[in-house]
Structures are given as C-alpha cells and as structure tokens.
Image: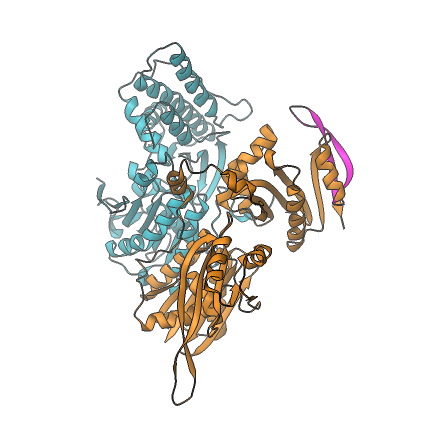
Amino acid sequence: MKILALDTSGLVAGVAVTQDDRLVAQFSIQYKTTHSQILMPMMDAIRQMTGMDMGTVDAIALAAGPGSFTGLRIGSATAKGLGLAWGRPLIAVPTVDGIAYNLYGCEQMVCPMMDARRGQVYTGIYTFVPKKVNELKGEQIYDMQVLHPQCVTSVEEIAQELNRRNLPAVLLGDAVPVYRDRLEELLKVPYSIAPLFRDRQNAAAVAALAARYYEEGKTVTANEFAPEYLRPSQAERSGAEHGHEAVTAEDRKAPVRVFVREMTAEDVPAAAVLEKEYLRKEAWTEKQLLEAQARDDTIYLVAEKAGRIVGLCGIQNISGDGEITNVSVAADSRREGIAGKMLHQLLERGRGIGITAYTLEVRAGNLPAIALYERMGFRSEGTRPGFYDAPREDAAIYWLRK
Amino acid sequence: MIKIDQKTDEDGVIMMSVHSEELKLHHEHAENVKSVSDREITILAIESSCDETAAAVVRNGREVLSNIISSQIALHTVYGGVVPEIASRKHIEKINYCVTAALSEAGKTLKDMDAIAVTYGPGLVGALLVGVSEAKALSFATGIPLIGVHHIEGHISANFIENRDLEPPFVCLVVSGGHSHLVVVKDYGEYEIIGQTRDDAAGEAFDKVARAIGLGYPGGPKIDLAARDGNPQAIQFPHARIDDAQYDFSFSGLKSAVLNYINQSRMQGQEINKNDLAASFQKAVVDVLVEHSMRAVKEYGYDKLAIAGGVASNSALRAAMQHACAEQGVKFYRPSPVLCTDNAAMIGTAGYYEYLKGVRSGLDLNAVPNLPLGDRERRFHVM
C-alpha cells in the first residue's frame, strides 16, 4: 500500500511517501518559507528523484487540523485536487494525533502543543499501550491511546490535565519553546522534551498513522473533505462572544506575558487600530498593512498580551538595508519594554533574510523612542527637515550598521 | 438567452450552472472566432478570489461549455460584507464539487484539458490560495500545464464570450467592489491602466451609501433597485474631477457628500427619500464613469468601449453608456449580468489568450492579493 502524506498545519511543510513498511521519501522544511510556494515543488522533487508514478498511490493522507488556517487551506486544497485528479480517497489524520505519533512506543504521556496564539495551544494527551506480543518474532506492537482528544485550550488547563494524571510526560510541538518557562512553573509531573528530529509535525508520522486508518476503512472522499479548525472564524466568534469580553479583576492580577510573533492576516485589523491610535494621519491602513505583510521582503511582528495585539513593528528589506517601517505600542502598554522586545526579535529575524544594516525615521522630539534606539546601538545620521505634519516636525534618521 | 439553473445547498450556498446556446456555439459555426491555433484548445478554469467558488470549461477562448458558480453571498449578508475566513472555509468545501460539475456538464474529463487556468490575484489571500492550491494539485497530478490568470483581466475578457466580433484594441471600464480602472486593452493580454480611483472603488461607494441609508448589503443591486423609483435630479451631488489626472476617479468625496446630506436632513428633522437619494447618488457615479470613458475612447481614437466587473451590471450605468456610445458612434460592449459577477468562464477566456502566447505557471505559483494589472513580471520586486 502506497500513501502520499502532507502536513502544512504549522511552520513545517512536509511531504512523505510510504509503501507498506518503507518510508520511500520524505521532504521537510521548517524555515521562513511560504507553504504555497514550496509544497508542490517538494512533491515534484520527490517524484523526479524517485521516478515514481505518484498517481499509483492508494490514498492521500494529510494533517487535517487544527493548525494555521492558511496552512490548513493550502494542504486541504492540495489534497483535494490530487484526490480528484487521481480518483483516490483522502485520509484525515487529526494534526495533534499525527504529532504524537512521532513518539510511537513511548509509554509515558505524550503531549503535543501547537501555538494557537491568543495564549492558547492546540493540544491533546496520548500514550502508547502494548497491544500484543508477536509470538514468532517476540516483537511488541503498540496502540496509540487518546487520553485527552485534541482540543484548543490554555497552557494552564493542559498542565492541570497532565498533573491530574500524575505520570511522566514528554512534550513536543512548536508551543513548547514559547511556553517553556510557564510549563516549568505549572508542571508537577516529571517531564522531558522531545529531541529536534521528532518534535514537530512530521509527514512520515502522518503517513504511518494514516496506514492504520486506511486498514480500518477510515477514509473520506476528496469532494467531502474539509479540515477541522477547532476554532470558529473571528467574525463568528465575536458574534458568539459578544458581551463576554470584559476582563475580570482576577485576570488583571495574573502576571501578563507578552508574546512577540509574526503578524498574520488575522491580526491586521487590530494592528491597524493600533497604528491609527499611535500615528493618526500617518498611520498605515488595514489594506497597506495587509499588502506589506504578504510580501516576501518584509517581516511584520506583533506583540500579544492577554490575547490582545498591543504592539506592531515591521521591516522591509531593500537590498540588504532593513528599513524599519512601523513601530507602534498601545497607549496602555507603553513603558513595559514591549517596543524593545519586538525590535530585538525584528533585528534577529532580519538577519535571517539577509539584512546587514538597519534604518528608521523618528520624530525628532520623540525622546523615549530615540533613547531606546540609541540603547540598541542606532546612531543618528541626519535629519529630514519638516518631514512630519500635524505638528510639523523634523525626522531624525537613525542607522544601525554592523 | 442565458439560463441559470440554481439550487441552494443546506448551508445557504447557492450553486448555479449558467447555460446558453449562444455561449456554446459550435466550433464549426463560429466563423468569427479567430482560431489562432490549428486544433481545439480546451481549458478548465478555476476562480476563488472573493466569495464565489467557480469552475468552467471553455473551448477556444470564447465558447463556454460549462460555467459553475457557487455563491456564498447569503452567508456574508449577516455580517454586512464578505468575511475572508468564512469565504476561505467555504471555498474548501465547494471547490471539488464545482470542478467536477464543470467537467461533467461540459461532457469532458480532466484528460481532455489542454490547460488549467486559475485566478492568482488580486483578491483575498486565503480565498485565492484555495483555487491556486487546487489548480496546482490538478496540474501536478495530470501533467496539464498551469496558467495563472489576473482576476481583472478575467473580468475584461468576459466581454469576449458573448461578443465574438470584439477584438482589441478597445477601452474597458472595470468597476467592481474592489476596482475602478479605466483600461486600454491594446492587444490580447496587453493592458494599460490610464485611470483609477484615488480612494474608494465604485462598488465600495455603493456598499457604503447603501449601508448609510439602510438598504443593506450588497449595496450595488439594492441601490440600483431603489433608484428606479427615484428622481436622479432630486439632489445635486458633486462630481469629483482630478486636475492632474483626467481619467482618475474619486468617490470618497461623493460618499461624504451623501453622508452629510443624510446628517443635515436628520438634524432638520426632514424625512429622507431613499429612492431619490439612491437615484441621485447613482447618477453622480454614473456620470463620472461615462464621462471619463467617453473621453478616453475619443482621445485614443478607438471605436469600441466595453465595461466589466460587478458594477457593470448596474442598469443605470449600462443605459447611460449605451446612450453615450450611440450618440458618438462608438460600439458598446457589456457582458450579461451573470458574467459581470465573479465567474470562471472569464478566467478560461483570459487564460486561453495567455496559453496562445505561451504563458505557463510553475508549481510555485502563489496567491498574490495585490497583484497589479498588466504588471506580472514585476510582481515580486520592489520598484
């Protein structure tokens, strides 16, 4: 039996082909790449290098959600197109189950956590139980048992679930580095973290689990398939949650963490409000932000605090010079070091796309901002007289050269 | 005559199949169709840039063998506009049904296709990605060449479907919810934008004004309908002109004037006549669109004018253009209203002319939400 498996649910773009007990080919990339641009070329590379007729696969397996909405769309539409063209069924593997299957044979609790933003994770709890001993070979076969099915929840809740079971746990997934400190505080059970070659989405694991689904007849037609998002869209959510958004006094007391992460299209409306509040007439519009965010030569980061976007910054790479185009922080979150936190990440990530020098313009009278830039090593290299309007003011030009 | 079979799915999505004997005109009888290639070229086209999932099969660029449109409009009405995440999710659910229906209604299979054309921009990125990913998978699985098509080039090309005598060069006014462009179509696939909106698109202005006077979404058809019972001379709204760019449009001033009028009327305790207001606003928009279009035709020395895009189905615009063109001896072209809305047949037509020119897209084709018209080579570069 031949299976072609895809996983585009997170930062990893993965393709694998399995034939019976053999992993024929696997291509996996976890880098700053656009799944839409690399997924098909990866599949094509496998076809070319193996010389295999891909149309002979028995089924197309995919990580069927949850995950990044965009990623799920790309994987789903791709799998549906392949299924339609080849007349083959799809095998929908729950994303979190697929990640857990990385640790096949592990008798501890296996807890994948994917960063779901807004302080939440896509997670579940699994373990592998010995099924039967193969009399001839004496080989142990395991069944994956779902202790807590995949869901979207807070880190606190899933930690509580693990503590309640009081067994050692192995953690994996892209939320682990994000919440590492918090997990250390919360977890009362012994735990370890999966090594880097088994700690993320893995198309081969999806294929292996899919093979079991296939034997059990758990397939879906390409026409019918739709991913499991585990979350309604923002519009549906705000309709449903209307009136429940007030923050309680209890929430206020809890230490609030600020996360810096890449801006997604979903963040744009909130980011535009932030821009407007801070820059008024010079603010970028939602449309401008959306366009800028989608480009290949930009990096846009947002700071998220208690599920709210409180900071925005962005950079554009102009042949090695990084022009910092936006830095905004919400009025009620200033003087908390958020701008510095965002900028450090921005410079770090900028290097990843080939930026060697950084520049920005700032109102000459914005002393707190200038102090921050100077602390970070930026130096003034001139002014643009009367650059800003309302009130009219010079722009100071700052550069950070390495 | 165009016939539309439609049914509403359980989830509120309307599935339509557009038929017309004229659209299906058999190849041998289509003398006017310039067959540049010796053999028949059949294209499967896919469109998912906004809230319509669509697939079509088009032969030799102008013969529509099938045209399937799945419209989500009813789902978005409650939100007063298209919600991108909801639109994208629905595309995923509907895309295979549309492609399958388009092939079976055309009496074809994938193997019969010479190319797969797909809209890759401009539009909502999540929505575009569904069509693009599906088309790339189909192309990869079958080896059939892939052609990325510009959505607006598709709208312009909708005119070729019902007007077999239409050939470039001509001037085309593209007006929709997201675009207001005056375009010179120099040749197949060769476009020059000579005018565009400085602020709101024409369709956007319709939506906003409709919302302000409580007509609801979508604004275009609602205003069109109300205006039929109104007096277009009742209120004088300003006609914006831009001094240094004679073909550019600006609708935000007009929109503000309408909002001011509503506020003033309210403050003075006067009842607003919605029909008169709709008619007067519509006239102000239409006047500018017609005036600019006619000036362009004249200055470029062409004798053909076409309109395209969702707003091109506005009855007042069609009537006024028809009238102005007749007066000046200019031949006027417009697609049937159903071909003005987003559909895949128009993408198949635009894709055909790209196909003839040898344009092919790679498997790395991406959705480009802000794809500029006639500027494909530069799309990934900073200018």
Q: Is residue B63 left or right of residue A278?
A: left
- Quarter assignment of residue B213: top left
In which quadrant of the rendered image does the C terminus of chain B lie? Answer: top right
Image point 45% across, 52% down: which residue?
A: A153
State whether residue B315 is above or below residue A268: above
Foreground residue among B59 and B197: B197
Image coordinates of residue A198 in percent, x first then y, are 53, 68
Q: Is residue A382 magenta?
A: yes
Chain A: drawing colour: orange
Image coordinates of residue B322 in percent, x first then y, are 32, 27
Q: Is residue A186 left or right of residue B295?
A: right
Image point 30% across, 19% down: which residue?
A: B275
Q: Is residue B371 in sight in this rendering?
A: no
Foreground residue among B264 and A128: A128
Coloration mode? by chain
Image point 42% across, 32% down: which residue?
A: B302
Q: The chain shown in cyan is which? A: B
Q: Is residue B306 in sight in this rendering?
A: yes
- Decide whether the magenta segment is chiefly helix, strand or loop: strand
Foreground residue among B65 and B221: B221
Image coordinates of residue A73 in percent, x first then y, are 42, 54
- Quarter assignment of residue A210: bottom left
In which quadrant of the rendered image does the N terminus of chain B lie? Answer: top left
Image point 34% across, 54% down: which residue?
A: B44
Residue farthest along the top direction in this orientation: B268
Magenta region: A376-399
Residue farthest along the bottom direction in this orientation: A136
Image coordinates of residue A194 in percent, x first then y, are 55, 67
Q: Is residue B148 magenta?
A: no
